Image (tube, rainbow, N blue to C red):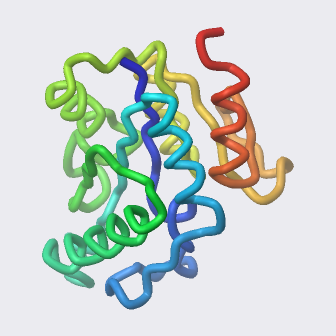
Amino acid sequence: MKAVFLDRDGIINKNPPEGEYLTSPRKFRLLKNVARAIKKLNELKFLVIIVTNQRGIARGIMTENDLKEIHSRMLKKLALQGARIDAIYYCPHEINTCSCRKPDIGLFLQAKRDFPEIDFSQSFVIGDTDKDIIAGQRLGCRTILVKSNQNDTLTPPADFFARNLWEAVSKIIANVDK
């Protein structure tokens, strides 16, 4: 089965300013056309899975309950527009203290244990940082970098570039089964 693994901040919701964290459901803001993009992936029979680093928990800036409330709000907002997330995996740890924090692939492997039918070679990772792209490449997934400016390149480069999630889904549609 094909899956699309999405980073959360900057892909689904407005990214908090550098050095800050999304700590409250009240501050959660879906980006434009995100629900439309996820709904399209649902229609195309992709599993849609969020994989997100959330070290604000380890730093004591937020609790796991805060994160659950944020995710609950996100899921409700998406559902109101007909979009579904199949699973959410998050790393609550500080840098370099675990194997689940991207660019490590522990959370993706957990998703594979929970959804054994996932075929990484037919799947995509969509993110806005090198950590997302590196994790996707380690898994053998195709990768899509979402940035507002294509001059924001990474090493190693992603397979595709998009300005937002809707454009990323358009790239998937154009390249599925290729």
Q: Position of residue 155 (x, y in %)?
A: 67, 35
Residue 42 lies in quadrant: top left
Quarter of the image that includes the N terminus: top left
Q: Is residue 169 left or right of residue 152?
A: left
- Specify the farthest residue to the bottom: 26
Q: Is residue 17 above or below residue 172?
A: below
Q: Position of residue 177 (x, y in %)?
A: 59, 11
Q: Residue at x 46, y 82 (%)?
A: 20
Q: Residue at x 19, y 33 (%)?
A: 110
Q: Position of residue 55 (x, y in %)?
A: 29, 66
Q: Residue at x 57, y 59 (%)?
A: 34
- Specify the farthest residue to the top: 178
As rendered, which of 75 and 140 lies closer to the eye? Answer: 75
Quarter of the image that includes the C terminus: top right
Q: Is residue 143 above or below residue 161?
A: above
Residue 174 lies in quadrant: top right
What is the number of callouts on the image?
A: 0
Q: Position of residue 154 (x, y in %)?
A: 69, 41
Residue 139 lies in quadrant: top left
Q: Is residue 174 above or below residue 145?
A: above
Q: Is residue 133 left or right of residue 113?
A: right
As rendered, which of 105 and 42 lies closer to the eye? Answer: 42
Q: Is residue 107 left or right of residue 7?
A: left
Q: Is residue 70 left or right of residue 42?
A: left
